[in-house]
Amino acid sequence: DPHVGDTDEDGINDGDEKAYWDTDWNTDYDGDAATYPNNLLDPDSDNDGLGDGDEINVYGTDPALVDTDNDGIDDDAELKYWGDNWNMNYDGDGTANNLLDDDADNDGYLDGAEFDLNSDPADPYSMPTDTLLIDYGSDGLWKYDGAAFTKYGAWDPEDIEAWPWYKGMAVDYGAEGLFLYDLNKNGIFDDYDKLGSWDPENIEVFDDLMAVDYGTNGLYKYDGTAFTKIGAWDPEDFQAWEGGLGVDYGSHGLYSYNGTTFDQVGTANPEALVAWKDWLVMDYNTTHGLVMYDGVSTHPLGAWDPEDFEAWGDLLVIDYGSGVASSPPYKGLMTYDGENWDQIGTWDAEGLEAWGSLMAVDFGTNGGYVFDGTSYTELKPNNNRTDPDTYEPAGDTLFIDYGTDGLWTYDGTTLDRIDDDDPLCPVNAEDMEAVTFD
């Protein structure tokens, strides 16, 4: 329109817009030529929700591309997500514009994938993956990606540990040594390195480090580049917690390691360690019962010997065997919130696994259940009461190994078997590890 400076009212005057488009001024990028014969008449030439003027003058995006940085999310949708933080440089890569940065936190995942799978594209420690690693014993290490099973290795893994900081997984292959697999942007472990020939007795990730127990060779930490020996004693167990790494040195006592120094927590030898909220909780059996360490001092929680315990949000779930008791000494399955005890079951639990707002409980021959804080739902594969072997939570999915009855998933509503369509897939997993970094 010769009487209007900006014919399509997109925020850029016709002369500047013609100069911008040059010979592409009449290229139909969004297939709406019947409505808008050329880009000087089309206020949103790529139909991504952002006007051409804003794309050119404000955000620096391409008005001809729906997804300028090709990260899997349209420009307008991405702008709405970032809001006022669209020009924050989260990863220090020099691109202070998340609409032009396909991986805003440089964690190896495209922003669109993080949006779709509910991880945080601004947090490098939050990464989406549907990968489940399965140890099938002599049948080797397998991966399940939500659609298909893939065999990764023929050796029998002794331990598998996801390492969010490194974006990969550590696998202990026993006498074959310790290996570290790298995860690429498509959620595939496409490369691996052998870290050492010694057979680890235990591995545990804490913060950006991995602790490796090499038995009589001592305790080491690995930072992604090199090993450093941090202790000569042979640990019996260790547990990552808010204060670093809790290390049970058996008769030498319990210590906490913060990445630099050790502090002795106690002289007694705990049977088990669990991280709960900001605390490290120890089971000292009939000697002292449950004891909590807050980083400064220890506090007794109960003098009774638990069979198992598991952190579940703000609650600690403790299995005291079978029986009914509403007052000390407690029996059955109990919860503790830091002040109050409540009994939530009378059967003896064989396994506990926290899964978001639910607690998965293996009651042995009484079957497998999920508890929502009020009531139990029984999980019955093929409508039969079955004793689960292992639970493994992965985001919105709970993986359940029923031994010879196969591998199943539960989404909070439906129980489905996932290994029966693949004739090459083994059954009866020995261990599972969900590589979920969000």
Image (cartoon, helix red, strand yellow):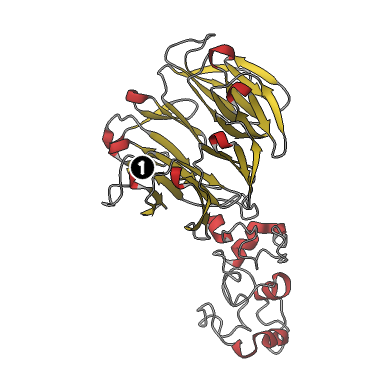
Where in the figure is residue 52, as x and y percent of width and height?
A: 65, 75
Residue that appears at 53% across and 77% down: 30
Which image quadrant: the N terminus? bottom right
Q: How many marks?
A: 1
Examine the image and state in which quarter residue 261 appears.
Answer: top right
In this rendering, does residue 303 appear at all?
Answer: no
Examine the image and state in which quarter residue 46 appears.
Answer: bottom right
Residue 78's place in the image compared with 225, above or below, is below
Q: Nearer the viewer, residue 393 or 191?
A: 191
Where in the figure is residue 31, as x and y percent of width and height?
A: 50, 79
Q: Callout 1, which amino acid? A: Gly
Residue 277's place in the image compared with 179, above or below, is above
**Mark 1 — residue?**
137
* Extreme-front residue of the structure: 217
Where in the figure is residue 333, as x and y percent of width and height?
A: 47, 19
Determine the secondary structure under disc 1: helix
**63 relative to 392 in the view: left or right:** right
Q: Nearer the viewer, residue 372 or 49?
A: 372
**191 relative to 389 in the view: left or right:** right
Examine the image and state in which quarter residue 259 appears.
Answer: top right
Where in the figure is residue 143, as x and y percent of width and height?
A: 41, 51
Residue that appears at 37% across and 53% down: 151
Residue 324's place in the image compared with 33, above or below, is above
Q: Nearer the viewer, residue 419 or 120?
A: 419
Residue 331's place in the image compared with 124, above or below, is above
